[in-house]
Image (cartoon, rainbow, N blue to C red):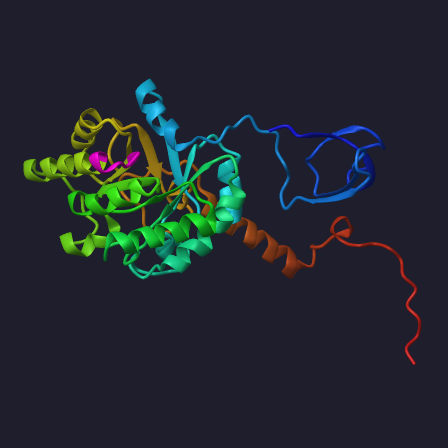
Amino acid sequence: MNQIYSAKIVECNKNQIKQNKNIDIDYTLAIFCNYKGNTTEKIHHTRKEKIMDKKKISVLDFQKFKDEGRRFAYVTAYDYTTASIVDESDVEVILVGDSLGMIMLGYSTTVGVTLDDMIHHIRPVVKGATHTFVAGDMPFGSYQESPEQAIHSACRMLAETNCDCVKLEGGVAMAPTIRRMVDVGIPVMGHIGMTPQSATSFGGFKVQGGTPEGAKKLIQDALALQDAGVFSIVVECVPSCVAKALRDTVRVPILGIGAGPDVDCQVLVTHDLLDMYGDFKPKFVKQFAHIRKEMVAGLNAFHQETVDGTFPTEEFSFNKKVEIPPLD
């Protein structure tokens, strides 16, 4: 997105910009005089505005991509800074997942995450990722009680965060609730397979659909969600052949995390794929960068230069000479 303003510059922190020049917004603070209204507009930029060709996708694009055979990518973010980084990438979708309980809050499971926690984290992600589709995860206990509870929780999430859809776990059992949600205009993304909120009920974080009966149940779940009106379905930790069968059976896109190559979209947790989280790495995660190692190295370099007294140099100091009067 290239925004060009023709304006008289009153104040700007880019020395090379002259008065009455066309300028693109890639600086931190500028004050403009509006020619028509002679008003002054103060524009703050918390991060450098980038000229972007990236166009935010919509709910309808999910189906369009599947119909065209176009694969796309889906990652997580839980804060403004990470969201802004994803927004500068080619990744099309962000999930603010209840996995924030483990990754950001240090919980052992996702079950302790509340609706207020989710809303708190989704808001900055939406602000930081204006060119990226943002899905909000509905946490445990916010939708299972009744369709009315689910609608109330989802409406809160959408209204208070401006995210693009909600995601919730469950198959056949949740289909009536999802139908009610869709009927009142709530865009819903489904989630089947290994569903973290109910992982303890099937013995922990284990691959699902590994038997003929299990595979059949997953297909039944997917068809029920499709009939209920979801626009896409996350399928987590299932054998590749089962994920392929799901993709070929249902019309809506299958978004796979630990589901092999034959899905419509690949999903990974950002902290996993960038090697930020720590020791634990699921089998299905490929680490595309090693950011944690680089961060530790940077912190150690800062510590060493602090101990050595080599930081800061004049380059990183305010060097104006000030005459200090004697103290009385």
Quadrant holding the C terminus: bottom right
Q: Is residue 250 left or right of residue 24?
A: left
x, y percentage for residue 18?
84, 32
Q: Nearer the viewer, residue 325 or 131?
A: 131
* Highlighted range, magenta: 226-232
User: Where 256 falls versus 125 (above or below)?
Assistant: above
**Is residue 78 visible from the viewing direction of this image?**
no
The image quadrant of residue 76 is top left
Image quarter hosting the N terminus: top right
Farthest residue toward the top?
68
The structure residue drawn at horizontal position 93% and vertical position 71%, both measured from the top left corner, is 325
Residue 119 image point, x, y percent: 43, 54
The answer to whether residue 196 is seen in the rendering is yes
92 vs 58, nearest the viewer = 58
Left or right of 204: which side holds 323? Answer: right
Q: Quadrant of residue 3?
A: top right
Going 29% across and 41% down the picture, which residue do you hit? Answer: 183
Q: Residue at x 52, y 38 (%)?
A: 130
Which residue lies at the image location 29% right of the left edge and 29% below the top edge? 253
